[in-house]
Amino acid sequence: DDDDTVSGLFGVTSIPMKRKIKSSNCDGDTDVIEINVSSFIFTTSSIPGKFQIQKAKELGIPPGPLYAQLKAGKTIKFKRKKVSDSIDEKEEEEMTVEPSQVLEGGSDGVAVSLIYCPDENVLDQFSNEDCGIKEENKGLAKLNRFKKTFCNTDGVVLEVMIHYTPKSILQSNKYQSWIRSFDENIQHITMHPMEDHMLCSGNEEADGSPFRSAVLGAMTRSLIHKDLYAAPFPVLTHNDEVKEDNTSQLEDGVLNICRARAQMVYNLIPLAKKGLCKDTIPQSNNPFGLSSKDYASVQSSAHDSGAIVAAKSILETSSVYELNTSTDTTKSSIESNKGELIFTGTGSAIPCKHRNVTGIYMQVSNGNGILLDVGEGTIGQLIRSWMSICPTHENQTDYIRKRLIGIKAIWISHPHADHHLGIIRFLSERNAIIQRSSDIVKDRVVLMASTSLLQFLDEYSAVDPTIAGGYLSVDCRDTLPERDHPLGRKLYETLGIQWCASVPVSHCYHSYALVLDGTSFGRLVYSGDCRPSDRLIFHGQGADLLIHEATFEDGMEEEAVLKRHSTVGEALSVGKKMNAKAIILTHFSQRYPRIPPLQKESDTLPFPIAFAFDFMTVKPSEITIAAKLTPALRLLYPDTTEETKIDCEGAVGPSAKEILSVPGVFATSTFCDR
């Protein structure tokens, strides 16, 4: 709707369009459907000009509130002594002063348009000038009035056009011709969807990741072992330089056009300062948004801590390690070493400067993969990981698309946000790629989740159909150990998984752990979030690899019970009872950036214990090495007890022990939803 602009606020006008996309239903039937997409025009209220105090004095306007009213664009009335030959000096006259009499350089308002043009079909609608004349689309008609060939009678000036469109559309002759039909003084700013990028956001190859501390930490760990702890960006020297992507520039250079950059600012008001704030545009001579000082800091942190020397000593005294396996077929799969685990997030609750929230990608021997939980930012983290291992002979964009399409299944442990908020973006980005596919039904991903999460996705699909038709829903209740998996054959054909079972565990409603047989790691067990579970121990017996949450340090058992999580010691106890051959601990409390300590008893456990970090990439033969490198990693993260104290000082209310002393505490509504 075309809303009136309220003084001091933006008016918003939507430009509705129709877009055609491929979709499929539960029966596998494919169809082309129309969905609604929108662009927008944002319009300011009138902008008063500069107040001319001398003119106000000449008109006899008394200083004070009347000045403020005129500056705000309001007409004023006041009384002043009448200028005449009359003897009566007290005679007054009423004066009316318009803002235009004392203001110079004002404007009826400025407008900014956000243009979303995902394909040629939408471009055809934008280019249809008849729509502007007939006013079948009021929003488009308003946009068309800013064209050179139309008369804009309201005095508002279109200042900026932001184009969110694929590069292929932006650079087409038709799109260039359309934007040239507007005034040549308009500032054009371009943004492109992820499928156009080598990296996961607008210009990370120049601007870097928004998660600066996490990136620097990952780059430092990569110096310990470049394969296990892959750096999201190359650890360059200060002499290396990244060329800026200028493919958004139009060839003739007539238009004012630039690519959007992180933190870039465009001033609309005041008019005297309007335009791009050049000092907010990052300089392209800093590769990946990192300065030579940042790279030097990465190198010094790894060397000065002694971590590199320690890691080198460990690796020199170690041989190639492999997990013991239960069957010959599994051993053959493990020895091929084609599978891998990528940890996209290893923290709990919310992202922090050191760890993202939970996400794990597992690749199997045929190159396909499955996601175990999809916390927010999972796609970004995953793409950064892939970029660090992309073969030099492959096109990076095509490589990412192939890896995304290769994700054939998703399993989400429970409906807490830190385990599923990334699912919408994943489905949106993946569906944008499979729209190009000739067989969208074949490329659908199997999505295993709780009832409540599947219902949420159904409701979201009704609002945003771009994610509909791209996944097959499977309720975790239908994948319990005693039941036949509804899509077990599809999982076997695409991933080689022989058995996939969701095991109910104690955390919140609809919480599950996962047991997978037939992976590149053999039997893989993933705990999700939970208290130690005898049921999981039973069904996961003999696991080749157990990935278990270890939210709390040992000594915080009461907090673990209260929050329904596990401590490090409890997780190791589960592994021992399960007869697991190796354990990777993850899902650490965000108050502990360092590696949690292990009790002395852990030295006697019959399996290697590795601690997960963001961007950690583990192959089956590398788990023992990952465990051996723990002492070197500890040198990078010394005991920061003061930091922990600071995090906890602000805590108020009863302690965990006091809460647990209340009879029936877990029966209250407060804890039933935890």
Image: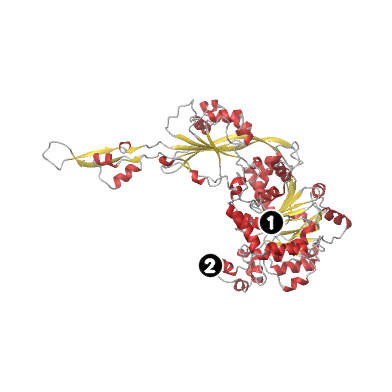
Q: Nearer the viewer, residue 375 or 26?
A: 375
Residue at image coords 63%, 67% = 638
Q: Nearer the viewer, residue 494 or 221?
A: 221
Q: Is residue 232 above or below residue 531?
A: above
Residue at image coords 65%, 40% = 196
Report x, y in % for residue 7: 41, 42
Looking at the rendering, which quadrant does residue 463 occupy? Answer: top right
Q: Which residue is mark 2?
A: 650
Q: Does dot 2 land on a helix, a strand or a loop? A: loop
Q: Does dot 1 land on a helix, a strand or a loop? A: helix
Looking at the rendering, which quadrant does residue 212 occupy? Answer: bottom right
Report x, y in % for residue 308: 69, 61
Q: Earlier in the sequence, mark 1 or mark 2?
A: 1
Q: Give the residue type at disc 1.
A: Ser
Residue 146 placement, left or right of 61: right
| Residue 546 seen by the camera | no
Q: Which residue is mark 1?
A: 222
Report x, y in % for residue 170: 60, 34
